[in-house]
Image (cartoon, rainbow, N blue to C red):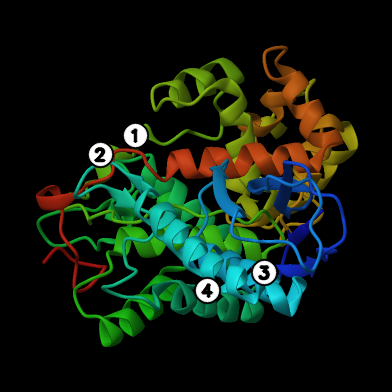
Amino acid sequence: MLVYGSTFGAREHYPHVTLGALDASTPLPKQDVEIHASSSCLQLYSVCLELSNSDSTVTEGSSINAWTLKLQIKFINQFPTTTIIYIGVVLGVMLSKSISVKLSKMAMANWVTVFLLMEVVLSGSRFGGADGLNMNYYLMSCPFVEPVVKNIVNRALQDDPSLAAGLVRMHFHDCFVEGCDGSILIDSTKDNTAEKDSLANLSLRGYEVIDEIKEELETQCPGVVSCADILSMAARDAVFFAGGPVYDIPKGRKDGTRSKIEDTINLPAPFLNATELIKLFGQHGFSAQEMVALSGAHTLGVARCSSFKNRLTQVDPTLDSEFAKTLRKTCSAGDTAAQPFDATSDDFDNDYYNALVRKNGVLTSDQTLYASPRTRNIVNAYALNQAMFFLDFQQAMVKMSLLDVKQGSKGEVRENCHKIN
């Protein structure tokens, strides 16, 4: 049996490959051979090789003209072109090296099959029509967009790990207001107060990372990559480099041409209860479970005292008394004093949910997830099973990245992320 395995571990760039061998004398009935990739034990996709032969046994002298190779890729989550090509290269090497020299002609013929199938996969990984989102949207127009984004985000997080929280939060605040269109990046003018100057957005961080990416991409492929896509990819990579799941998102978003402070009323406030959060997220098409999964982004970062001091004015039965003392001590330094959401605020893990179980949630909107019977079981599940949280989180993030995107003539590609063209 042919076996291929790869693992996408947190903080790793590329899969580690292990290949089995094809014994030319082994009986080979029709069979499926699975190729798995996983992130923290999560199956992202599977590739199945179906080997079939009219004979059940293959020896060195056997005819190989009847052999066929079929490659089927089942998308559980979409993955980038580089991964698909990588699979193709590995399969080709496997075919050419694992089989005896006398089978080399078959191996070379199957190289063609593999890459024809790669082409089918590549052309089929679209979201929408001609102007629709596509995993490989920049494959021809700006082929190095992915490594540019990854390298700059990685470098920024090495210098300041807390920026991971800033980039993820900025992406969320962008998508929940007028869709994922980069409107959060636009500066206010004398005639307009933009989203970023809303009270809810004053603590956002990471603008300089987006600017650095945009500057580099404008040098390589001017006028091609939107600020909305840059922000979405930067948030994705921030999750990964902080130790979270690897996932990919379709590209092709255009930048919006509206950014008004009054639109930020749609952002969830830190004092909302579970019922209100379910309703608000439901308006954007999210289920209660997806809302709880997205709330897990609070495994990164801190909250300002101004957003939770209301819990300290009277006894809060959902707040652990010892943790209340910790919050009071934090707030003694003023409204801008910061309290980490959990004990590992720079690491993407499930410690946030364990904090909720201990009644150590910082915000009302955090602790309510455990206090409410409607969401408590989800919190318990994520607290016990980080792999489940990672899977649900990455799926919810991909879904969020598709909120009300602008495509084609409905948007633009800004030359400068801070102002409309």
Q: Which mark is residue 262?
A: 2
Choose between 11 and 200: the one closer to the eye. Answer: 11
The residue pinned by badge 3 equals 95
Question: Of callouts 2 and 3, which one flags the residue occurring earlier in the amino acid sequence?
Answer: 3
Q: Position of residue 186 (x, y in %)?
A: 25, 61
Image position of 280 with respect to 152: above or below: above
The residue pinned by badge 1 equals 265
Distance between mark 2 and mark 4 Cα atoms: 33 Å
Distance between mark 1 and mark 2 Cα atoms: 6 Å
| Side of 207 where 273 appears, left or right | right
Q: Which mark is residue 150?
A: 4
Q: Secondary structure at mark 1?
A: helix
Choose between 244 and 193: the one closer to the eye. Answer: 244
Image position of 201 with respect to 23: above or below: above
State the image quarter where residue 93 is shown: bottom right
Neighbor class of circle 2 (other Cα within 10 Å; few <14, some 14-19, many 20+) is few
Q: Which mark is residue 374?
A: none
Please, what is the three-letter code of the amino acid marked with disc 4? Lys
Question: Of callouts 2 and 4, which one flags the residue occurring earlier in the amino acid sequence?
Answer: 4
Question: Of callouts 1 and 3, which one flags the residue occurring earlier in the amino acid sequence?
Answer: 3
Neighbor class of circle 3 (other Cα within 10 Å; few <14, some 14-19, many 20+) is many
Pointer 1 with pointer 2, Cβ within 8 A: yes
| Side of 22 where 265 appears, left or right | left
The residue most toward the bottom is 219
Mark 2 or mark 3: which is in front? 3
Distance between mark 1 and mark 4 Cα atoms: 32 Å
Q: Position of residue 328 (x, y in %)?
A: 76, 44
| Side of 206 where 421 appears, left or right | left
